Amino acid sequence: MSKNLEFSNILILWYLKNKRDLPWRNTKEPYLIWLSEIILQQTKIIQGTSYYLKFVEKFDTINGLAKADEKQILKLWQGLGYYSRARNLHKTAVYISNELNGKFPNNYKELKKLKGIGDYTASAIASFCFDLPEATVDGNVYRVLSRYFGINTPINSSKGIKEFKKLAQILINSKNPGTHNQAIMEFGALMCKPKNPNCLNCPLNSSCIALKNSEIHKFPVKTNKIKIKKRIFNFIVINNKHEQTYIEQRNGNDIWRNLYQFPLYESFETIEVNEIMEAPIFQNILQNQSFKILKFNPKPIVHKLTHQHLYTTFWIVELKTHLIEAVLWQNLSNFAVPTLIQNFIDNFKKSA
């Protein structure tokens, strides 16, 4: 038996004994596999599972998903973040439903052409659904391979991406590629964890280079982290005795595109009440009306995104007048909003 096949067989044997019972593991239906993979990008399984089940209940076929309005999908996606995934999900569903008669391509090359589907997702669908020997490489796979083989090439470099993909492709079990891919990813998630890996009970511990050299903590290697951008957000929250408020839809290519928010004034530094009142957007909304204004949160709320930290203040503006083109507070639940806004709405309701 070759060393590559032995490596795969050990992982598969471990997987069959230890795998978690997850709903998308009981099917070869491409739509369901694709849906689960898109949801689980940048999302932990414990959170992603509930969203997966909600989507499957609402849209049991890709044609059903394609017929839905994007606003409906964004609302169902609310709380998962990285909303471009949801928009691409819908675009791909529409394309497959209309152009491919509701059927997914059955090979890696054509799958990778679809919106929102990269190397990993195309490999996952190809191997899980069509038994093609396409290796999946995610964070778990990077960790397992870098430790076991002692590879110090940065995983977030172009060289590292190519090197690990090539190695994963060499190691894949061509007779059982789907189970092999599931096994190595599950092994990384449960056994070869980022912190406190279970090296004592690892079935590969006798030949793991990182363990042999007492360097588990050094792998995988990454280049310098991306600089985090700091932004100052000031949301103007209108409220009146008629329980009305204003919201607006974000557009452009910034964060939260197509989601809804309260009118926003972004400043270069933390500001006080006189400065928010001088902001053009504030004056346009109020138009010389009488009002009372106060900070809802005394200190800025720090909302952390992958490459940005948002320092946010919610300014409550109390009016007596009736608002035109406004939204009732009770109807805000119909709009897809970022988690930051939803958390504020929930807290504001409690304080009312």
Image (cartoon, rainbow, N blue to C red):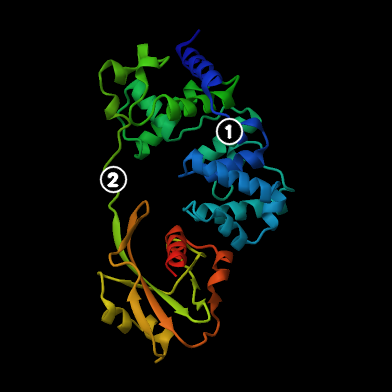
The residue positioned 30% from the left and 33% from the top of the image is 221
Q: Dot 1: few (<14), some (14–19), or many (≥20) neighbours within 10 Å?
A: few
| Dot label at residue 91 | none
Q: Nearer the viewer, residue 138 or 122?
A: 138
Q: Is residue 308 visible?
A: yes
Q: Nearer the viewer, mark 2 or mark 1?
A: 1
| Dot label at residue 22 | 1
The residue positioned 61% from the left and 35% from the top of the image is 23
Quadrant where the C terminus sits is bottom left
Q: Nearer the viewer, residue 158 or 43?
A: 43
In primary-sequence order, the first of circles 2 and 1 is: 1
Q: How many marks?
A: 2
Q: Position of residue 38 (x, y in %)?
A: 54, 45
Q: Position of residue 53 (x, y in %)?
A: 62, 44
Q: Dot 2: few (<14), some (14–19), or many (≥20) neighbours within 10 Å?
A: few
Amino acid marked by disc 2: Lys
Circle 2 sits on which residue? 225
The residue positioned 45% from the left and 58% from the top of the image is 339
In the drawing, does residue 27 fall left or right of residue 301?
Answer: right
Amino acid marked by disc 1: Leu
Q: Residue furthest top?
A: 1
Question: CA–CA distance between discs 2 and 1?
Answer: 32 Å
Does 43 sit above or below residue 244?
above
